[in-house]
Image: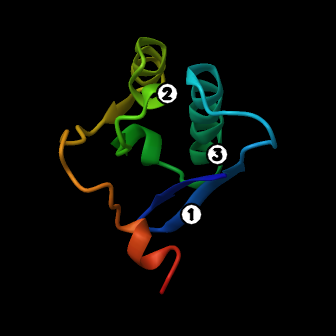
Amino acid sequence: METVFWDRGGIIHLDWLPEKKTINSDYYVEELKELRQVIKRGRRGKLTRGVLLHHDNARAHVSSKTMAAIDDLGFECLAHPPYSPDLAPSDYWLFGE
C-alpha cells in the first residue's frame, strides 16, 4: 500500500507500507512528522502559510492521538463528510485512466 501526500505543485511525499504491517495511529503520526520535515525542506514557506490535510475518516486518521499530532504539527484538518463518496482529485489525475 502506498500513501501519497500531494499539493497543487505535485507529489510531496510517498510512503510504501512495509509488508505485513497495517496503518495505525502510531504509524500515521510518524508519517505526518516525516511529511512536516519534507515540506520544510522542499516547499519553503508552506508551513508558515498553513498546511491543510484532507483525508478520509479511517480510524488511524481520526484517532485522538492523530488529531493531537495534527494540532501539534500546526496542520489543519478539513472535515470529510460522513456519507461522501470516497473519491479524491488524485483518483483522477495521479493514477490516470
Q: Nearer the viewer, residue 92 or 40?
A: 92
Numbered disc 2: secondary structure: helix
The image quadrant that residue 52 belongs to is: top left
Distance Cα–Cα, label 1 vs label 3: 11 Å
Identify the residue under disc 2: 60
Is 92 left, or right, of 43 in this rendering?
left
Numbered disc 1: secondary structure: strand
The image quadrant that residue 62 belongs to is: top left
At x 80% / y 42%, what residue is drawn? Answer: 18
Q: Position of residue 89 (x, y in %)?
A: 35, 67
**Amino acid tagged 3:** Val
Identify the residue under disc 3: 38
Q: Position of residue 24 (x, y in %)?
A: 59, 26
Q: Which mark is residue 11?
A: 1
Q: Which mark is residue 58?
A: none
From what the image shows, is residue 56 above or below residue 42?
A: above
From what the image shows, is residue 68 above or below residue 97?
A: above
**Amino acid tagged 1:** Ile
Is 85 left, or right, of 41 in this rendering?
left
Is 23 left, or right, of 9 in this rendering?
right
**Amino acid tagged 2:** Ala
Dots 2 and 1: beta carbons under 8 Å?
no
Q: Earlier in the sequence, mark 2 or mark 1?
A: 1
The residue mark sitting in front, 1 or 3, is 1
The image quadrant that residue 64 belongs to is: top left
Q: Position of residue 57 (x, y in %)?
A: 35, 35
Dots 1 and 3: beta carbons under 8 Å?
no
